[in-house]
Image (cartoon, coloured by chain):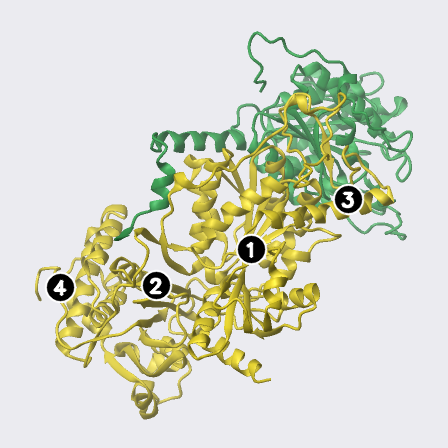
């Protein structure tokens, strides 16, 4: 085996392809997320556009070899711009029979399947429910449908590490790198960035250079195995994608929210007081922010979701920016506290990283079924601003926009992310932080008194926002409560006319935020037969489906709502320029219900609730069906 | 902590300066009036600028309290006052944050938040107005109501056992635990002064009469002719003596407390000497209950010097900030992360 790491010279037949979807799968302890993440980083650095989606079980370490313990990581990398991690899988790397069984149905006909044949033992095959005496690798029908390659990865990993000082357990943990090495050969990826990361992580951070070394050995072993065994007739070449010049990094949705909040703290000159309670898939926001104490971020792990919400309200009253993050079940618990922020008219950010419900549902699986909860899931007439990011990187922009809207309009803002955006990742052109506008906040001082009294519920004539007077300011002592308030004074009032006026004022204030948001834009022609309208994480699949339908000659355009309450002022105009409005959603038709009731437009839905992201082909199919009606 | 500059004299207030312009709307004769008087009195004597106070309440009769104080204030939602107060204090540790709410609010729907606020030792003061009944919802039994209590929701008597607020506070690790009576404005305002000056979560239980739905519940302790026999006033370093003629006392026997009569072979030095700093004594005191024993009033427990939650949070922030890059590039470093690539 050569000693050098300079191994990235392509040899043999090489076939250019535009885009590839690759999926790593195995036991939840097999390091599939790590292997997939490495492939993604390397491809991003190589210059491909990438989109990733990890798919893991809720169980931390489910019993080995079972189908419910299967962890997967899907990645699409491309020589042109892409918006999704892809539909059908071109290459599946299956570390065990359970992974094979769960994922084989997603592989395209003729697709490549690389299986760790050592794990297809009688015991393991039985464990994942294959009938006695059956091995799918020997199945003729499967072999006719897919190009199945058997690679004895477990044995080859141990052999590669013969003489190494590390234990057998640690050796076996390197198998994922054998698979990665094979994949790297197949797609002509450089090994160096990954090997450097081994040394940085295992060597420097963990103080175990021998593990870094072992992983590097196995990665190379996989790479050379693929080369010398001549298993694959061709290898593939995915050229870099043309993209805007700049400095890039890979970013997931949850991490982008963390970076965005740190930016908000600086731009607003405020402390972010983040109160959270652990919940999948939102916990990483708490983890990320807890490390940013040097960047004006204070985190508070509350005793429950309600306390987290209420602490955020208290923080905003006290003059900092209260933020909380949760998932659907947590948002339900927070609803009363969010209503309190609405009647207090305080700025606040609530992030809901949606997951499949109802109830506990499927915590690690994605869905976008909390839209109506975010809009209306509170007692009384209780409006607030609702935004939804469209991609992982968009989370950075949207949380800054949320903060701007919250302080300008003195209202809570709900951000609807989801599991797909939270854990999915894409390349992100790092913005120039200095070029981001300050977030302007004016707190009143003692001279804000009128005739000797401070009136906390007077309003800005343009935005209807009330003044944000903060404790510690002499002369502005005032009380606010959850009871209905008298206009201007904020005192308790049960007056019927006042209540109606206040209900309307709170709604009107939120409506006027429409003046602060950009208009709805259309991808494709400005008018036509079909407008595909979406919100949240379906953006990529809808945009791609629209592109594909136009290529097929259909007059289909797409539009995406990042602002759901209020919607952009031109929304109705845009929708009416199309014969048909079709709304694909990862729910049973929640935006559909809003659009139909708000505009009396006979929109149709394409609805999935499968705990996974939309596939482009299912939208294309759905649109074609609805067009023929 | 006042941020007033050195040459600015401390503000001088009278209790009236803490009265808001709102009409007080409690029922005539409600024990809350006396507590309001006591709070205003204590605040006037503290010399802390009025704008530094934030009163926070939940829901219930007692929870109207902030509206009547000319300070900053929040009337929140049912049970959540400790959580909101935690957010206020975390956002601005310079503020003095006081919670005033009832037994239903702080111990039933908000029991969780009360326990956790105390556990964290965040520097706030909790005033529990315990009237052993739900007043605002018109007379259902509360988590502190006596067993067998007949109310609208328990026509045959309550089958619940009550919880003991001071024992709950002690179990949660409270570093300042006190009890008083609504009728004793002086004792209350003295205790409140100490509670606000205490660094950490301070907890005061006030026996409060609901003269509409639970009138007389605490008469065994609060009346001129009953108080001396059925309560014992705690004084640090002094023996526990009670009774009209100050001839009865409390001593420890067999690990529990018993009431004894002085002179009957029992001398003052045989009695339990109150030590506010002793958590074991504090726990025993929380267990003293009428009619078996007189109930303690005053400070059961105060331990000073335990770092507060807000102090610990701020010191972590200081530590992290001092280690961070000074040139303002920390945010950029974070946003760039560990791995970037350049597209030309």
Which chain is disc 2 placed on? Answer: A
Instruction: Give the quadrant of residue A9.
Output: bottom left
Which chain is disc 1 placed on? Answer: A
- SS class, disc 1: loop
**Above or below — where is A150 with respect to B265?**
below
On the rendered image, what quadrant is the N terminus of chain B found in?
top right
From the viewer's side, name the closer residue of A111 and A114.
A111
Nearer the observer, disc 1 or disc 4? 1
From the viewer's side, name the closer residue of A173 and A533.
A533
Q: Is residue A248 left or right of residue A481?
A: left
Nearer the observer, disc 4 or disc 2? 2
Could you tell me if the residues under marks 4 and 3 are in contact, i.e. CB atoms within 8 Å? no
- Label 2 to label 1, Cα distance in Å? 28 Å
From the viewer's side, name the closer residue of A220 and A145.
A145
Report which residue position mark 2 lands on.
A50
Whichever of callouts 4 and 3 sits on the residue coming sooner in the sequence is: 4
- SS class, disc 3: helix
Whichever of callouts 1 and 4 sits on the residue coming sooner in the sequence is: 4
- SS class, disc 2: strand
Whichever of callouts 2 and 3 sits on the residue coming sooner in the sequence is: 2
Chain B's shade in the image? green
List x then y, in percent, for residue A593.
66, 67
Report which residue position mark 4 lands on.
A7
Chain A's shade in the image? yellow
């Amino acid at each position: 085996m050569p000693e050098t790491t300079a191994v990235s010279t392509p040899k043999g037949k090489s076939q250019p392809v535009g885009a590839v979807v690759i999926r790593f799968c195995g036991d939840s302890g097999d390091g599939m997320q790590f292997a997939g993440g490495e492939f993604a980083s390397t491809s991003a650095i190589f210059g491909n556009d990438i989109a990733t989606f990890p798919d893991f079980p809720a169980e931390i370490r489910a019993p080995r070899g079972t189908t419910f313990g299967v962890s997967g990581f899907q990645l699409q990398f491309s020589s042109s711009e892409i918006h999704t991690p892809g539909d059908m899988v071109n290459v599946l790397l299956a570390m065990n029979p359970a992974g094979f069984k769960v994922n084989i149905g997603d592989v395209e006909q003729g697709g490549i399947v690389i299986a760790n044949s050592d794990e297809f033992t009688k015991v393991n095959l039985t464990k994942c429910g294959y009938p006695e005496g059956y091995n799918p690798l020997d199945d003729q029908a499967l072999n006719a449908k897919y190009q199945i390659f058997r690679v004895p990865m477990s044995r080859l990993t141990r052999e590669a590490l013969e003489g190494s000082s590390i234990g057998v357990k640690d050796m076996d943990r390197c198998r994922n790198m054998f698979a990665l090495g094979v994949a790297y050969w197949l797609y002509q990826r450089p090994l160096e960035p990954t090997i450097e990361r081994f040394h940085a992580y295992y060597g420097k951070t963990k103080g175990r250079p021998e593990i870094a070394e072992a992983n590097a050995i196995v990665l190379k072993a996989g790479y050379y195995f693929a080369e010398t065994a001549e298993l694959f007739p061709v290898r593939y070449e995915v050229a870099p994608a043309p993209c805007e010049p700049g400095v890039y990094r890979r970013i997931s949705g949850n991490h982008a929210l963390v970076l965005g909040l740190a930016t908000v703290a600086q731009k607003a000159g405020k402390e972010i007081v983040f109160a959270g309670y652990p919940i999948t898939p939102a916990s990483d926001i708490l983890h990320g922010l807890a490390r940013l104490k040097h960047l004006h971020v204070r985190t508070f792990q509350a005793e429950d979701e309600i306390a987290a919400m209420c602490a955020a309200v208290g923080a905003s009253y006290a003059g900092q920016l209260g933020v909380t993050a949760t998932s659907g079940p947590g948002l339900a618990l927070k609803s009363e506290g969010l209503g309190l922020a609405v009647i207090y008219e305080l700025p606040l950010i609530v992030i809901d990283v949606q997951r499949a419900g109802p109830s506990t549902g499927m915590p690690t699986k994605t869905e976008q079924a909390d839209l109506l909860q975010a809009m209306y899931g509170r007692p009384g007439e209780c409006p607030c601003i609702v935004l939804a990011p469209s991609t992982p990187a968009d989370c950075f922009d949207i949380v800054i926009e949320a903060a701007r809207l919250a302080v300008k309009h003195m209202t809570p803002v709900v951000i609807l992310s989801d599991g797909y955006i939270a854990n999915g990742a894409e390349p992100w052109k790092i913005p120039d932080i200095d070029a981001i506008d300050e977030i302007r906040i004016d707190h009143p001082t003692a001279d804000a008194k009128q005739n000797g009294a401070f009136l906390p519920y007077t309003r800005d004539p343009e935005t209807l926002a009330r003044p944000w007077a903060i404790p510690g300011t002499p002369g502005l002592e005032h009380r606010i409560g959850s009871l209905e308030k008298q206009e201007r004074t904020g005192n308790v009032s049960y007056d019927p006319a006042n209540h109606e006026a206040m209900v309307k004022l709170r709604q009107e204030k939120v409506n006027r935020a429409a003046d602060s948001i950009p208009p709805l834009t259309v991808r494709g022609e400005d008018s036509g037969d079909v407008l595909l309208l979406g919100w949240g994480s379906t953006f990529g699949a809808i945009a791609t489906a629209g592109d594909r339908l136009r290529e097929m000659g259909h007059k289909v355009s797409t539009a995406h709502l990042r602002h759901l309450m209020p919607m952009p002022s031109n929304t109705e105009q845009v929708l009416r320029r199309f014969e048909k409005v079709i709304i694909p959603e990862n729910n049973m038709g929640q935006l559909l219900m809003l659009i139909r009731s708000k505009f009396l437009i006979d929109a149709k839905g394409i609805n999935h609730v499968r705990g996974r992201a939309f596939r482009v082909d299912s939208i294309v199919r759905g649109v074609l069906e609805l067009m023929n009606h | 902590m006042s941020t007033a500059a050195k040459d600015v004299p401390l503000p001088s207030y009278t209790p009236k300066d803490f009265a808001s312009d709102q009409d007080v709307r409690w029922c005539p004769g409600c024990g809350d009036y006396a507590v309001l008087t006591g709070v205003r009195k204590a605040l006037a004597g503290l010399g802390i600028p009025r704008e530094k106070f934030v009163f926070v309440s939940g829901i219930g009769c007692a929870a109207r309290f902030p509206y009547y104080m000319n300070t900053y204030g929040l009337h929140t939602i049912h049970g959540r006052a400790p959580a909101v107060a935690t957010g206020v204090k975390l956002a601005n540790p310079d503020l003095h944050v006081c919670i005033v709410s009832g037994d239903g609010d702080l111990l039933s729907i908000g029991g969780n938040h009360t326990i956790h606020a105390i556990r964290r030792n965040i520097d706030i003061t909790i005033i529990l107005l315990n009237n052993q009944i739900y007043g605002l919802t018109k007379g259902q039994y509360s988590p502190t109501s006596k067993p067998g209590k007949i109310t609208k929701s328990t026509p045959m008597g309550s089958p619940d056992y009550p919880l003991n607020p001071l024992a709950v506070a002690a179990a949660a690790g409270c570093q300042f635990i006190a009890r008083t009576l609504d009728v004793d404005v002086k004792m209350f305002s003295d205790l409140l002064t100490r509670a606000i000056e205490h660094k950490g979560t301070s907890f005061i239980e006030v026996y409060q009469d609901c003269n509409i739905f639970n009138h007389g519940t605490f008469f065994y302790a609060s009346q001129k002719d009953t108080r001396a026999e059925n309560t014992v006033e705690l004084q640090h370093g002094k023996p526990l003596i009670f009774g009209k003629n100050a001839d009865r006392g409390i001593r420890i026997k067999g690990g529990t407390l018993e009431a004894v009569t002085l002179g009957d072979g029992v001398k003052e030095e045989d009695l339990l000497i109150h030590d506010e700093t002793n958590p074991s004594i504090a726990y025993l005191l929380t267990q003293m209950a009428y009619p078996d024993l007189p109930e303690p009033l005053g400070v059961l427990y105060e331990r000073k010097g335990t770092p507060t939650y807000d102090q610990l949070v701020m010191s972590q922030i200081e530590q992290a900030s001092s280690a961070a890059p000074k040139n303002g590039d920390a945010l950029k470093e974070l946003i760039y992360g560990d791995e970037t690539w350049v597209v030309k």
